[in-house]
Image (tube, helix red, strand yellow):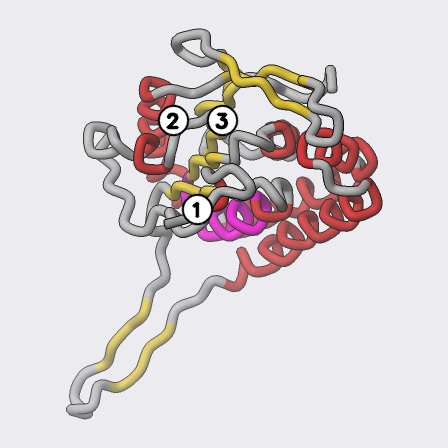
């Protein structure tokens, strides 16, 4: 686990939590602590939100082909590191190694798919019912996205949400489940290697999505559709969601 990042990834840089807090990650099969990752607090969330807002305008102007090529490179790197990523996933989540390798392949495919879709984002048009006017449809990035991922598919659900955000030209903050942050941090390192600029952040820890977005207004970002539905990202396995 020594090569897997354990810091927060904010605005393209690896940083410790502002208050120095860390969160233990254990192997569910043995109970052994395998790593300590930075445990993000409100100040870290605010920094991630500000970074997302700051980068959005320029990132939205990036050519679709450039975004496509970043996703394609990330897809290839993921496949090259199948065994490494599978071992990380098994260690932190408990999935059998064969199933973890399957998830790595599944995760990579989302990046390949959206690399091809990035250059096909189009618009449309038509005649209004009155017959005298025409309408135009223009698809544009919605802006910064908060992506919440669950503990049971820590890599694939990350690529499934990051992929369309990159393809569309949206900046993003990924908040992985506190039980399985290492797969997401490994993914952030791969995206940086693939050439993704400072448009994405990964903040780990026990914060809820509501706590992450508590300072969004101060960062000039009001998330319209923050993905708060993936509640298994913040619920301990076995707990009941009321």
Magenta stretch, residue numbers: 158-171
> Residue at 45% of width from left, 23% of height from top?
10
Q: Do the residues labelled 3 and 1 touch (CB within 8 Å)?
A: no
Chain-order first, disc 3 or disc 1: 3
> Residue at 58% of width from left, 55% of height from top?
114
Q: Quadrant of the N terminus?
A: top right
Q: Position of residue 179 (x, y in %)?
A: 57, 31
Q: Name the residue under label 2.
A: 48
In what element is the residue under mark 2? helix
Chain-order first, disc 2 or disc 1: 2
Q: Is residue 121 magenta?
A: no
Count neighbours of disc 3 (C-alpha within 10 A) and say few if under 14, some if 14 to 19, many if 20 or more.
Answer: many
Alpha carbon of mark 3 to alpha carbon of mark 2: how far?
A: 12 Å
Q: Name the residue under label 1.
A: 231
Q: Does the magenta stretch include residue 162?
A: yes
Between label 2 and label 1, give the one nearer the viewer.
Answer: 1
Residue 174 appears in the rendering: yes
Count neighbours of disc 1 (C-alpha within 10 A) and say few if under 14, some if 14 to 19, many if 20 or more.
Answer: some
Q: Quadrant of residue 83?
A: top right
Q: Name the residue under label 3.
A: 204
Q: Where is residue 37 in the image (x, y as percent from the top left)?
A: 56, 18
Alpha carbon of mark 2 to alpha carbon of mark 1: how far?
A: 21 Å
Count neighbours of disc 2 (C-alpha within 10 A) and say few if under 14, some if 14 to 19, many if 20 or more.
Answer: many
């Amino acid at each position: 686990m020594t090569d897997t990042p354990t810091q927060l990834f904010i605005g393209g840089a690896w940083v410790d939590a502002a208050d120095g807090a860390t969160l233990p990650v254990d192997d569910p099969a043995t109970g052994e602590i395998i790593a300590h990752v930075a445990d993000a607090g409100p100040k870290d969330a605010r920094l991630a939100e500000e970074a997302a807002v700051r980068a959005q305008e320029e990132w939205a102007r990036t050519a679709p082909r450039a975004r496509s090529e970043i996703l394609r490179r990330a897809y290839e790197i993921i496949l090259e590191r199948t065994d490494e990523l599978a071992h990380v996933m098994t260690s932190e989540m408990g999935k059998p190694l064969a199933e973890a390798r399957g998830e790595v392949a599944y995760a990579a495919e989302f990046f390949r798919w959206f690399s091809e879709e990035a250059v096909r984002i189009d618009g449309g048009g038509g005649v209004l019912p009155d017959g005298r006017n025409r309408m135009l449809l223009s698809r544009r990035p919605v802006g910064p996205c908060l992506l919440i991922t669950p503990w049971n598919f820590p890599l694939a659900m990350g690529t499934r949400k990051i992929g369309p955000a990159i393809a569309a030209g949206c900046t993003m903050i990924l908040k992985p489940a506190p039980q399985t942050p290492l797969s997401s941090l490994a993914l952030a390192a791969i995206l940086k290697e693939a050439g993704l600029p400072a448009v994405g952040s990964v903040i780990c820890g026990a914060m809820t999505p509501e706590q992450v977005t508590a300072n969004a207004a101060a960062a000039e970002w009001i998330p319209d559709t923050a993905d708060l539905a993936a509640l298994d990202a913040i619920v301990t396995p076995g707990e009941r969601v009321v």
